Image: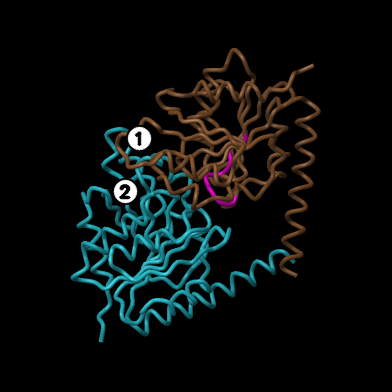
Chain colours: A brown, B cyan
């Protein structure tokens, strides 16, 4: 009975994910699900991206947090429309929550909608939201053993950002090992090293991002 | 029906947690559940603690990871018995897993058993394991907004370690804010600033730890 019930919950999520995916396709929106540990720099990365690409791309953000709406405020301060989902204890966003959030931003007018998932390197990767691509962010201070410890999340990434590269001089972090371990579970995803705080290395991420945009009719 | 099923799962976990708690009480063992984000320094903190207190306390460790047994190897290299639980995808340890793991270390002979939970600042805090105390570790690079974003986890802590304090000069981190936000949800737990890498500030944590030990008959 347990398995059956889990199946039913997943199906409901998948049904809504499909609905979201259809909405994105219909309106030529690229939706990107951003997954990382707490404090890897998701909001900082999105904030800088929004500022730097303000003239090129219309970006909106759906923010997922257990509590607080400070991240949505930061995104609005960066100049993009944002809506906050407070999950009230839940460890991941559901597709249903994304469906509801889409009506709170001018979704149809946007080129890219980022969904900043709850800070959690485990659970969010099991729930499709209807996104076109997944970004997984790993920050240098988290340590170089994370890809082998959380292979499921890295395996499902379409692009991996290694963030806070400016802190590498102060930390024992084996970059070659990280890249090797990511490639062992995911041969396709490009891996970009950057610092969303200093701006170093952001251009390669922007190039990837611009290539994901669909042509608005 | 969903709620009923969840209730039943929790009850099974709680039943096993009670069984574990009885085992710890019977053998005068202090069991400490260690919770943090991935990469906050749980294993490094435990490794240094084991080395520094080798003459004073008999420590054992139950390691929880989704995959890999590298953390248990690190703990053994520090000189303590360790058993690895691989959760194979699950985002937290269950009390049942802890019960099974206890038979794989010389539990009865130990003063302290640390349970290093899966790296996840959300889910582990909802599952009692039978522990006597909970340590929550927050590392400086994760950012000063984590207590307000994950209040449930901090509210249930018996002690909070602010780790990687050696990286504070390179990061915009408002320590006063962190302490204020933790105290807003948890007035009891002492908060210690330390660096498990450099050893700075570890003594206050050791003093707290030694005070938790039960008298072996």
Task: Write down the chain letter for disc 1.
Answer: A
- The image quadrant where one finds the N terminus of chain A is bottom right
| Vertical order, B5 against B163 (above or below) | below
Left or right: where does residue A40 sit relative to residue A72? left
> What x and y, as percent, mark residue A173?
37, 41
**Badge 1 is on which residue?**
A168
Q: Residue at x 77, y 58 (%)?
A: A8
User: What range is drawn magenta here?
Assistant: A115-123
Task: Write down the chain letter for disc 2.
Answer: B
Dot 2 and dot 1 within a common chain: no
Please tell me whether mark 2 or mark 1 is closer to you in this view. 1
> What x and y, as percent, mark residue B39?
41, 48
- Dot 1: within a 10 Å radius of its alpha carbon, few (fewer than 14), some, or many (20 or more) residues? some
Left or right: where does residue B92 sit relative to residue B200? right
**Quarter of the figure with residue B140:** top left
Left or right: where does residue B22 sit relative to residue A52? left
Instruction: Identify the residue at the far bottom of this view.
Output: B217
Q: Assign a secondary structure to mark 1.
A: helix
Most foreground residue, B1 or A155: A155
Alpha carbon separation for disc pair 2 and 1: 17 Å
Most foreground residue, B67 or B137: B67
């Amino acid at each position: 009975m347990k398995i059956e019930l889990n199946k039913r919950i997943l199906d409901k999520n998948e049904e809504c994910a499909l609905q979201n995916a259809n909405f994105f396709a219909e309106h030529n929106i690229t939706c990107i699900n951003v997954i990382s540990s707490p404090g890897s720099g998701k909001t900082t990365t999105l904030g800088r991206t929004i500022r730097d690409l303000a003239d090129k791309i219309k970006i909106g953000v759906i923010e997922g947090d257990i509590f607080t709406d400070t991240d949505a405020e930061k995104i609005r301060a960066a100049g993009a429309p944002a809506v906050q989902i407070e999950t009230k204890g839940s460890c991941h966003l559901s597709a249903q929550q994304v469906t509801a959030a889409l009506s709170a931003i001018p979704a149809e007018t946007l080129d890219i909608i980022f969904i900043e998932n709850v800070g959690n390197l485990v659970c969010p990767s099991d729930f499709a939201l209807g996104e076109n691509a997944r970004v997984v962010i790993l920050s240098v201070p988290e340590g170089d053993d994370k890809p082998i410890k959380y292979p499921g999340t890295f395996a499902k990434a379409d692009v991996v950002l290694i963030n806070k590269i400016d802190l590498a001089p102060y930390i024992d972090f084996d970059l070659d090992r990280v890249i090797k371990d990511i490639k062992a579970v995911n041969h396709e995803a490009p891996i970009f090293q950057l610092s969303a705080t200093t701006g170093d290395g952001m251009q390669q991420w922007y190039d990837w991002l611009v290539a994901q945009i669909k042509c608005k009719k």
